[in-house]
Amino acid sequence: MIARRDLLVAGAVGGAALVLPAPNEAVALPNETTVVPGARSVGNFQVSTLDPTTIPKYVTDLVIPPVMPKARHSERHGIDTYVIGVRQFSQQVLPPALPSTTVWGYGSLGDSSTFNYPSFTIEAKTDRPVRVTWVNDLVDSQGRFLPHLLAVDPTLHWANPPGGTSGRDSRPTFTSTPGPYTGPVPIVTHLHGGHSTEESDGYTEAWYLPRANNIPAGFATVGSFYDEFREKFADGHGLKWDPGTATFQYANDQRASTLWFHDHTLGLTRLNVYAGPAGFYLLRGGDGDLPKGALPGPAPAFGDRPGTRYHEIPLAIQDRSFNSDGSLFYPTSREFFDGFAGPYIPTTDVPPIWNPEFFANTMVVNGRTWPKHEVEPRRYRLRFLNGCNARFLILKIADSPTVRPARSAVPFWQIGNEGGFLPAPVRLERLLLANAERADVIVDFTGIPEGTELYLINEGSDEPFGRGEPGVAFPVADPATTGQVMKFVVGPLASKDTSVPPDRLRLPRIRPLGSSSVTRRLSLNEANSTNPLVPPGTPVQNLLGTVDSAGNPVLLEWDDPVTENPRLNATETWELYNFTVDAHPIHIHEVAFEVVNRQPFTGSPTPPESWERGFKDTVIAYPGEITRVKARFDHPGRFVWHCHIVEHEDNEMMRPLQIGGRRTEGH
Ligand SMILES: [Cu+2]
C-alpha cells in the first residue's frame, strides 16, 4: 500500500499538493529535537498478530450496553450516586470459536456481572447531579496490584509512580534503556464533554494507584494534584476520597448530549483506554432536548425485560489487534512503527516502546469484533463514537461490504454532535469521525425488504488522516478488514414507528456565544529526532504551543509554564495553527465550543461543516490550516487541552489550561 506521506510527495510533483506551511526555521527544543515539516518513513516491522482475515465476521450479535446501576441509597439529596470500579476480566471480544480476551473495564462495584468492555451506560438527567466514586480495583484476588496488560514506556513524561512524590508526573532519566514498567497502574477517569469543575474533571495528574497490599516502598500512590483536589472535593461536598478512589460530581448543567468517560492518566491514556475502560454517559432532558417520542427509542433503561427491543443504540467503534491466544496486541517496541531498532533513550531521544500512532487490524463495536444486528424496517437513533486511538473513521451504510468506492445505500441524518443537537438535521452519505468525536444520527430502514443485509463500512485511512476524498487523496482502509465495521440485517417490523421523520424534525434552539474578547494563536507541531544515530525524519514527539509574532510555532511541552490562562467567564477565540502533515482532533476540557471557521495559511476562511454547527468539544485541525474555535471559560481552575490521537496526547501533545487566577505551585 502506498503510504499517505508518499502520496503527499507524489501529489506535490503532480501539482495537486496539499498546501503546507512555508517551511519555517527549525525550532530548537530543549532536548535538541527540531521541527522538520515533511515526510517520515512508514515502514512496518513485522510481528505476528492474529490474522484478521481468519476472524469470521458477523457471527456475533451486537451488544447494546445496559444501564449502569446506581449505588444503594442513591436517591439522597437529589443526586444520582454510583460506585464504579475498574477491574481486569475476561471477555469474548472475538467470535466464540476463538479465545477470549483479558480486558479492563468499568462496572458497578456491588455487582460483578456489570463489568463490561465497554462500560454499561450512565443515564443522566440535566440539572440533576451525578456523583461517581471511581475505584481503582486493578488488584488480584490476594489484593496484590495487577501490572499493565500492555507495555508501558517509562521514558515519556508520565505519571511515573516509581519516582515517588518528588519524581512523579515527570520524564525520568535513565542511564540505560529501560524495559517496560510493570508496577501498579495509575488511573483517573475523565468525563469527556462534561462541564466539570476542576476537582471532578479527572485531571491527568490527579491519578491514583489501587489500594494494593504490595505497593513498592517509595512509590507515589497519587498524582501531584490528587491531594489538593481531594481537599477541595471534601470542602465542597463533605466527602473525603478513600485511598485508591476519587469521587467526582457532575452537575449536568449543560445541553442534553452524548458524553463518554475514559481514562486520562498522564502518559498512559493510550494504553489504559486501549485495555478497555470507556463508556457512554447520555445526558437527557432540559430545553436542549426534544420531547419524549420525537426520536426513535427506547434506549436501555434500568429493569428492562430480557429481549427488549431498542431503537436508540450507542455504538463505540474501536480498532483492536489480537495475539493468537486472544490477548490484546499493542506494540511492545518502537521498531513496530518504523523499523527503528535503536539505540533509544538515553543514547538517543527516541522512546524505546512508544509508537507515534497505532492502527490496529480489526474493528470492534461495543466490545465485539465485526458484530451483526437485526433491525426493524423503521427509524433508529444511533449514537456513534470514534473510540479508536489514532484512526479517523469515514462511515457509510452500503449494500456491499467490500465494493469501493462504496455506494451509500441508506443515508445518515445527523441531528447532534458532541455539544448536543445541531440547529437542524443534516442528511449525509458518510460520517467523518475523528477520535473522540460523536455523531447522533437517525438511520431510516423503513421500507427495506426483510432479509436485506446492509454494512456499516469505513473508508477512512489505515494511516494518519490528512484530508480529502477517500480513494483519491488517500487509500481507503483495507476492505477485507478495517474497511468493515458491522452488519445490519433487516427483520420484520415489530411495532409501529411513531418517531418524527428526520426531514420534519425541529431541533431545540441554539443560543450562540457572544463575541470573544481574546484571540490566542496556538500551534500543533511534530518534532523529529536530530540525533545523528537516528534516521532523518524520525518523529519523537508531537507538541502543542503558541505562535510568535513572525508566525512561527513556539513549541511547548507539558511542563512548560501555563500559556492558556483565560480570565474566568471570558469568551475567547482559539486559532489552532496546524504545522504538521496530519490532521489532529483537538479537545478542550471544561467547555463546549463553537467552530468559527477554517483558513489555509495562505487563503481565505471557510465556514464550519454542516455537522459542526452548534457546540463541539473536539474539532479536526487540518494540516496547513488555522482552525478557529470560540468558547466561554466559566469554571475556575486547572484543566487541559490536547490532541485526542491518544499516542500524541501521551507524548507531549497536551497542555495545561488554567482558567482564572494562576496557581503559585506546580507549573
Ligand atoms: Cu495529534
Image (tube, helix red, strand yellow):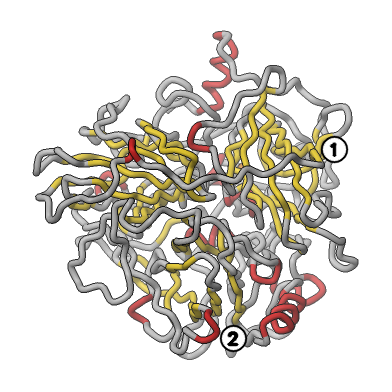
The image shows residue 353 at horizontal and vertical percentages of: 60, 54
Quarter assignment of residue 172: bottom right
Which residue occupies the foreground of this view, 204 or 374? Answer: 374
The image shows residue 349 at horizontal and vertical percentages of: 74, 47
Q: Can residue 344 be seen in this view?
A: no
Q: Which residue is drawn at 48% across and 42% down?
A: 422
Three-letter residue code for mark 2: Arg
Which residue occupies the foreground of this view, 441 or 481? Answer: 441
Position of 417 relative to 95 (above/below): above
Three-letter residue code for mark 1: Ala
Bin the neighbour count of mark 1 within 10 Å (Cα to Cα): few under 14, some 14-19, many 20 and up: few
| Label 2 sits on residue | 211
* Image quadrant where one finds the C terminus: bottom right
* Left or right: residue 125 compared with residue 553: left
- Asked if labels 2 and 1 touch by Cβ distance under 8 angstroms, the answer is no
Quarter assignment of residue 106: bottom left
Whichever of callouts 1 and 2 sits on the residue coming sooner in the sequence is 1
Quarter assignment of residue 479: top left
* Image quadrant where one finds the N terminus: top left
The image shows residue 91 at horizontal and vertical percentages of: 33, 68
| Label 1 sits on residue | 28
Q: Which residue is drawn at 78% across and 61% down?
A: 173
Position of 35 relative to 228 (above/below): above
Q: Is mark 1 on a helix, strand or loop?
A: loop
Which residue occupies the foreground of this view, 52 or 655? Answer: 655
Q: Is residue 324 visible?
A: yes
The quarter of the image that holds ligand 1 is top right
The image shows residue 3 at horizontal and vertical percentages of: 50, 28
- Please give the label number shown on residue 160: none
* Left or right: residue 555 compared with residue 212: right
Q: Is mark 2 on a helix, strand or loop?
A: loop
